[in-house]
Image: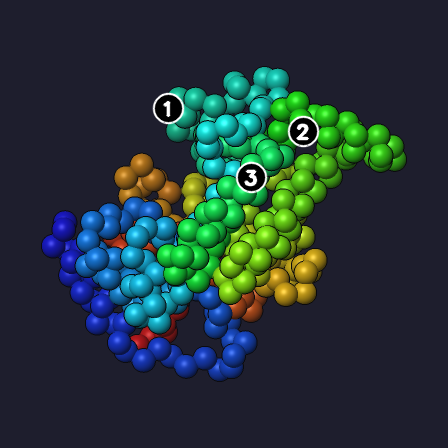
Amino acid sequence: MRQASLVLITLMYCLTYLPAKAADSATAPLSGQKIICVWSIQAHTVQDLEQAADSAAALGFNGLCWDTPGVAEVCRARGLKSWALLCPLARRPGARLQELAAGEDSLPGFDPPRIPPEQFYQYGGEPAPGNHEILDQNFTCPNDTGVVNYTLAEVQRLRESGYDGVIFDFVGYRNYHSCECPVCRARLAAWRAAHPELSDSEASGRFYAETLVALYDTLYDRTKTVAPGMTIANHIHPVYLPDLFYGLRVKVDLAGITTAWFFQPHWPLDKVRQYTRRVVEGPYSHSFTQGMPMFGFYTDGTYARDRKSAERLHQEFRILKEAGAQHLIMCELGHILRDRAAAEAVRRELRGAE
């Protein structure tokens, strides 16, 4: 198995130095940032990092998202942009954690080892039709007073490490709609009082969405102060069920919004098409924000059931290009490299028939 992996990596390395098919124009589909995320590859040496970066470039990606020492230098040497996922709501000492609504501790996700396979659990993506679930982990309340300072400290660390950009992730609610801690409840009550024209459900949906938008806006402005040259992207996750596209309103340079999720049942292609056009076309609240469709691919291990065929990948890329998407964020590099058919499909879509 390891020998086959090394053969594939060597092939990818050689392809890195072949000329990419020229784009018709600067605004041709997928002519912008094409970011691949990494978390299932072990990087014990610089050579491991170099092999992963060479493989990503050979597939046609021009950005590598991997928060591990040495990535920025390896990417810079290869003309790749270096990115790191940054989770502003990560659990930390002293943080106030989110609280669920009554009864939500009985939903799939509260006790991860007991999630039934037939639930088709989505790990923070949109639940499968008819299913109700929560995220399989808890994190900090977005109204916690330490969120901004924690995030800025992480930004400073990444800036000093040489990263070109950050991708904010896991900014949302464990139950996909609210945090029921005393602080959030008190602020919601005040917001309701100021908006008597709204029903309770409308007020809750608006309040909790605006809480996330305000946090994103603050993080963007403060990050640009600390690291003005750093590009700020995100991935809207977990899903916010009252407003699936609130991400169009947040302040980021690249708005990463899911258009084709990882897990079975795979989204119908009509849904992929609808979401892709929405992400590409907006409208976005900030004129500088550009849409960055996200889709995922898992192939083995725990997620063997969720594997997408090469033809399915070609269909998703075709939709992406037909919509005129310039940017892409895809997950995950290790899974792609361990699947020859998937690797070839991605390479053909991003580099063409070379």
Question: Could you tell me residue 109's position as x and y percent?
Answer: 47, 27
Disc 3 is placed on an element classified as: helix
Using the rendered view, name the quadrant where residue 143 is placed. Answer: top right
- Report the residue marked by disc 2: 184
Using the rendered view, name the quadrant where residue 46 is placed. Answer: bottom left
Q: Which of these two is toward me, 92 or 226?
A: 226
Residue 198, compared with residue 45, is above or below; it is above
Seen from this angle, which residue lies furthest right?
Answer: 197
Q: How many marks?
A: 3
Colour theme: rainbow
Badge 2 crowding class, 10 Å Cα cut-off, few under 14, some 14 to 19, many 20 or more, is many
- Report the residue marked by disc 3: 147
- Kind of residue indicated by mark 1: Pro
Q: Which of these two is toward me, 316 or 219?
A: 219
Q: Nearer the viewer, mark 3 or mark 2?
A: 3
- Kind of residue indicated by mark 2: Cys
Badge 1 crowding class, 10 Å Cα cut-off, few under 14, some 14 to 19, many 20 or more, is few
Check residue 113 in the rendering and tell me which mark sits there, or answer none: 1
Q: Are marks 1 and 3 in contact (CB under 8 Å)?
A: no
Q: Which of these two is toward me, 220 or 160?
A: 160
- Calculate the distance from the C-alpha at mark 1 to the C-alpha at mark 3: 29 Å
Residue at the spot 79% in from the left edge and 30% down from the top edge: 190
Residue at the spot 64% in from the left edge and 51% down from the top edge: 217
- Kind of residue indicated by mark 3: Val
Q: Are marks 3 and 2 in contact (CB under 8 Å)?
A: no
Disc 2 is placed on an element classified as: helix
Residue 173 appears in the rendering: no
